[in-house]
Structures are given as structure tokens and as C-alpha cells.
Amino acid sequence: MIELRAAGSKVVDRLNVMGLDRGKILADLDAMPQKEAGGWLDADFLAEFPDCREEGELLRSMTGRDWVSRQALRRAAATHVPMVVLTEGKTDAEFLAAALPVLYPHLTDLVRFLDYARRPEGGVGALLHTVRAFAAAGIANRVVALWTTTRLLLTDCAG
């Protein structure tokens, strides 16, 4: 990635010297959603996450400008959504949720825990499947996954 900071006319001159004109940039930009759609429409991926076909088809139909707008909206939304903490089981979530207001009361509105009252599947396998599903869905929330083997997996599903 190359970052240019200058007046607009100077940036245009530099890009032209580098062989990047408006047409080339727009063509590359239009290829971006097609490239992203390829991952969503991969047969192996769809076998595991068949509900993601619609997202892939949407990406395939986008222009570069649509894609940039979508990415900007996603980044803006991500700054206003709480972090999601996923745990291996109900007890872990209960203990962490109870400790948060005691240790960090100023952060309680910025952290959400999986609601085990709705009986989601527990265990490390289910936890990893949930993390993959969140990533596949491209949720805007930051996600922290914790399991009892004292390993920590941090991921940003928004991009």
C-alpha cells in the first residue's frame, strides 16, 4: 500500500507517473467486490455456511463505489457496537459478566456476553464454530473468544 499526502493535483500527478490513471484505479476498485465475493461463493465455504450465498451474490453485484461505501459504513458501525465475548460454556460467561461491573463498571455498556439462556451449544468445538460463523457473517462487533485451556483468540470480524 502506498500512502500519498499532498494537494489533490500533486497526488494525481504522482499517480499518473506511477502508471495509475483514473480508469485503472476505477477498474481495480470495481474488481474488489468481485474478489471478496469469490471467497463467499467458494463451494467448500458454502458447504459449511450455506446461508452466506446471499452475501456473496450481493458482493458480486456491487460496483467498486458500492463496495467502498459498504466498507465505510461497516467501519463506522464497528465503532459504536459492543464487543462480544464468547465463552466455552454458561458458567464462564456468568462469572465474567458478574465480574465486569465490579472490576470495570465504566465498560459494562461496551461488552456483551453470549446468552446461554437460549441454550446454545457449549464446548470448544461449538465455540470455534461460532467464531467462524461470526467471521463469515462479517459482524461489525469485535469478538473475544475464551476457553478453559487458557488460550485466547482475538478476532475482528468486521475486516
Image: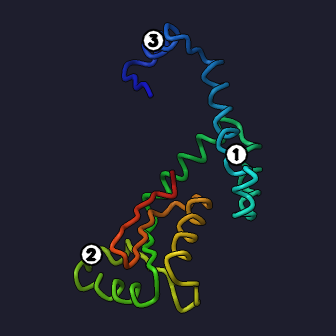
Left or right of 17, for residue 100: left
Of the residues tagged 1 and 3, which is closer to the observer?
A: 1
* Residue 33 on image: x %, y %: 67, 40
Work out which residue is located at the far left of the displayed protein and give it.
103
- Please identify the quarter of the rendering in which residue 66 is found: top right
What residue do we see at 33% from left, 73% from top?
150
What residue do we see at 27% from left, 75% from top?
106
Q: Is 58 rendered above or below residue 52?
A: above
Name the residue tied to disc 3.
14
Name the residue tied to disc 2.
106
Q: Is 159 rendered above or below residue 85?
A: above
* Residue 93 on image: x %, y %: 41, 84
Of callouts 1 and 3, which one flags the residue occurring earlier in the amino acid sequence?
A: 3
Taking depth in this image into account, of 73 and 158 the one nearest to the observer is 158
Name the residue tied to disc 1.
37
The quadrant of the picture occupied by the N terminus is top left
Q: Residues within 10 Å of mark 1 (few under 14, many from 20)?
A: many
Residue type at tag 2: His
Of callouts 2 and 1, which one flags the residue occurring earlier in the amino acid sequence?
A: 1
Q: Badges 1 and 3: C-beta atoms under 8 Å apart?
A: no
